[in-house]
Image (tube, rainbow, N blue to C red):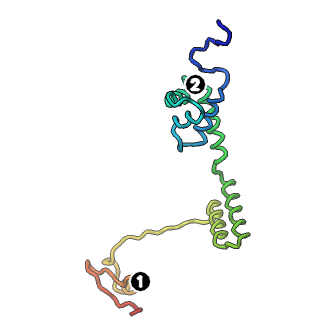
């Protein structure tokens, strides 16, 4: 075999990644969806005429298993870095609360503290949905019922307007 020729016709480096492959993997992972595979290949230095094919091949585990494993390792690293855990979440809210307190923004500080309490399960949100019609209420219950913002109460399919106290 002539000097300088490895006999590797496919161009795949089975022992280590090339600089372009590393750049492609980083572009692909760190630009998570904001760039296409082809754009990542172009930015990694692949020729415009072959970037789409290279990108497809580099993400194919049968053709480039080292590149695919490197991409998976980078993705796992990013996932771990930005993972939401209870402890991290509560610490971050405490930091936001403290920064808001330093700036004198009590509204933001209270909000951050309430969110910490919710995350810790200290608050129970309770919602009650009632259904029914006014037909099932007695006359006393209807008269005691708040009229709402318009002062209109539905009675037996029609509307009866009651004087607003502000008139």
Secondary structure state at the residue bearing disc 1: loop
Reading the image, the residue beneath label 2 is 64
User: 111 above or below 144?
Assistant: above
User: 155 above or below 15?
Assistant: below
Reading the image, the residue beneath label 1 is 146
Q: Residue at x 63, y 20 (%)?
A: 14
Question: Relative to the observer, which residue lies in front, 33 or 121?
Answer: 33
Question: Relative to the observer, which residue lies in front, 164 or 70?
Answer: 70
Q: Residue furthest bottom?
A: 167
Q: Residue at x 56, y 33 (%)?
A: 41
Q: Earlier in the sequence, mark 2 or mark 1?
A: 2
Q: Position of residue 119 (x, y in %)?
A: 63, 60
Q: Residue at x 70, y 58 (%)?
A: 91
Q: Which mark is residue 165?
A: none
Dot 1, crowdedness within 10 Å: few (<14), some or many (≥20)? few
Q: Residue at x 63, y 21 (%)?
A: 13
Can you say which quadrant of the picture contains the C terminus?
bottom left
Dot 2, crowdedness within 10 Å: few (<14), some or many (≥20)? some
Q: Are marks 2 and 1 in contact (CB under 8 Å)?
A: no
Decide if residue 121 is on the left or right side of residue 130. Answer: right
Q: Position of residue 24 (x, y in %)?
A: 60, 33
Can you say which quadrant of the picture contains the N terminus?
top right
Q: Nearer the viewer, mark 2 or mark 1?
A: 2
Secondary structure state at the residue bearing disc 2: loop
Q: Position of residue 81 (x, y in %)?
A: 67, 46
Q: Residue furthest top?
A: 1
Calculate the distance from the C-alpha at mark 2 to the C-alpha at mark 1: 70 Å
User: 127 above or below 32?
Assistant: below
Decide if residue 82 is on the left or right side of residue 149. Answer: right
């Amino acid at each position: 075999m002539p000097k300088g020729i490895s006999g590797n016709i496919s161009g795949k480096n089975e022992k280590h990644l090339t600089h372009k492959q590393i750049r492609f993997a980083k572009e692909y992972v760190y630009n998570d969806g904001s760039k296409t595979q082809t754009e990542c290949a172009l930015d990694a230095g692949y020729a415009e005429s072959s970037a789409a094919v290279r990108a497809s091949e580099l993400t194919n585990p049968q053709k480039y298993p080292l590149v695919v494993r490197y991409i998976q390792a980078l993705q796992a690293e990013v996932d771990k870095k930005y993972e939401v855990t209870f402890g991290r979440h509560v610490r971050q809210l405490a930091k936001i609360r403290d920064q808001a307190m330093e700036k004198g923004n009590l509204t933001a500080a209270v909000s951050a503290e309430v969110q910490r309490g919710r995350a810790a399960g200290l608050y129970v949100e309770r919602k009650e949905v009632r259904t029914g019609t006014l037909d099932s209420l007695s006359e006393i219950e209807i008269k005691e019922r708040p009229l709402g913002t318009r002062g209109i109460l539905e009675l037996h399919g029609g509307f009866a307007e009651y004087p607003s106290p502000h008139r």
